[in-house]
Image (spheres, rainbow, N blue to C red):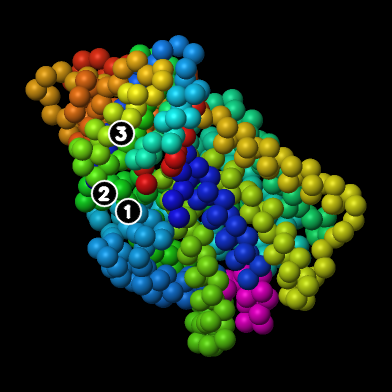
Amino acid sequence: MNIPKKHLFYVLAITSSFIAAAVTGLDSFVGGQNAFKHDPWAFAFSIFFVGAIVTLLISLFFSIRLHSKSIGAKVLDPSFTRVRLIQKTELRNHLAAGLMNAVNTVGYCAIVSTIQDPSVILSFSQVVILYLLVMESITEKDVPTLVEVQSSVIVTFGAILASISLNGEFQLMSLAIVFIIINPTWAIFSIYQRRLKLMRIRNKPNDAINIRMWNVFFSLLFTSLILLGFDLATHGGHLLAGFQAVLNPYLFLLLAATMSITFFSYVLYIRSLGLGKASINNAIRASTIIFAIPFSILLVYLGVINQFSTDPVMLVIKIIGITLIIFGIVSFAFTVVKAYIFITIKPGKPHKEIMNQLWDIKGITHVTVTAGKYDIIVKVSTRTLLKGYERIIRKIEEIPEIEKYRWASVLRDWENI
Amino acid sequence: MISAYILITMHPGKTDKAIKEMRAISNIVKISIIAGEYDIVIRAQVKNLEELLEVTDKLQVVEGVSKTTTQIIEKEISVQ
């Protein structure tokens, strides 16, 4: 399917959240099995153990070439060629993302095991959007615009309202785990996954399939180490219980199903991280809460989960929450400034080097070397004109080989005509 | 495949009608109305230079088009 590039970011993030919503239902069914019901730690290990096998098999399948292109490049990520070893430059980012994913999963399991209704506490994990806004302003030197802050706050509070349930207990310890472990680890995980996606490997953009595959491997490694340490310290047997669980063919198949679907959700999420900031990606992913509603109704109908509250007050709160999420996402989607910059290079200067320097500027989405009146035409996408000046024009002016440039704001455009 | 940007200067007051006609021309993949030195940027994707000539010929007879400047893309990096 040919998706217009201006919509690609939103299509990827929303499709990813739709798949995530579908897998949430399956997750709760798998987590409710006897082997995992009273041992969520074993569940965390099993999910990554089976996940590593399944992810490798899916990635190998996507490496098969059809008409000079891999299946993965045709259906999931055009940058994907085949399964490959990680490069030295990627290792640090993979280690950080793997560790964060493992700690996040263990933290999640700790909450699920201690409280009756996790939605009371886990709805606060949506605050991660605000964590990311702060982190990005430090790590990417990218101060959020007023629209980004407003929309993020709207989506965050909307997501909390839409996902909260008033049935369970409100435990301070669990809330502390969300704010101190779950939110920061997810935020750092997202930032490192985005860094990996923005890297260029063998002069091509990094691909989401290899990033996901290696993340599962590193998450398995760190989860095993965390559980081993925990077992040794508490004389527990969670790691062994996890091993025993995956030997059960029925449980293996269930875990394989959930991790196969999760693979697609994550690959699309990583691809969208390459197109937009992690905070905005997570804000759009809050739509998972909306998509989860039909799946929850289906699970209640099938008797997998208990009937949820139909108290009118709760329904009104949820409707307000959903409305806020939709308004926040729409606000993100419609506040983008696009422009072309027509550039003339000083005679005798190497175009390739200047092209790479321009590509490194955040907000530039296309760099083309052209033959004609101008030497290079770049396309820019930014939230405000002020940001376009501060983040792009200032950086362009720092490139000494550029003789002159002309900025032309896009007023309206049509794609795939 | 050859890709090119065609930069167009328009006579005032004819843009809306011209865009409608341009959208009917084959091999045009993107049209942007811009503010600045030019009025419209078109991205065309063609098999050979002859097809590109056909596109520019068709654009030049669209009512309101004053001048076209063609920039052939030699190399490109873009988000995927």
Q: Is residue B16 above or below residue A151?
A: above
Would residue A308 be counted in the magenta stretch?
A: no
Q: Of circles 1 and 3, which is in front?
A: 3
Residue bounds of the magenta highlight: A27-43
Q: Which residue is mark 2?
A: A204
Of badges 3 and 2, the one in the foreground is: 3
Residues A12 and A164: in front is A12
The answer to if A38 sits in the magenta stretch is yes
Q: Secondary structure at mark 2?
A: strand
Query: Could you tell me if residue A183 is visible in this image?
Result: no
* Distance in Å between CA atoms under marks 1 and 3: 30 Å
Q: Secondary structure at mark 3?
A: helix
Q: Which residue is mark 3?
A: B55
Specify the amino acid type for callout 3.
Val
**Whole-percent x, y for residue A25 in the image:** 66, 67
**What's the residue at 21%, 38% (across, down)?**
B50
Work out which residue is located at the far left of the displayed protein and give it. A348
Picture coordinates of residue A55, whole percent (x, y): 42, 70
Q: Nearer the viewer, residue A24 or A35?
A: A24
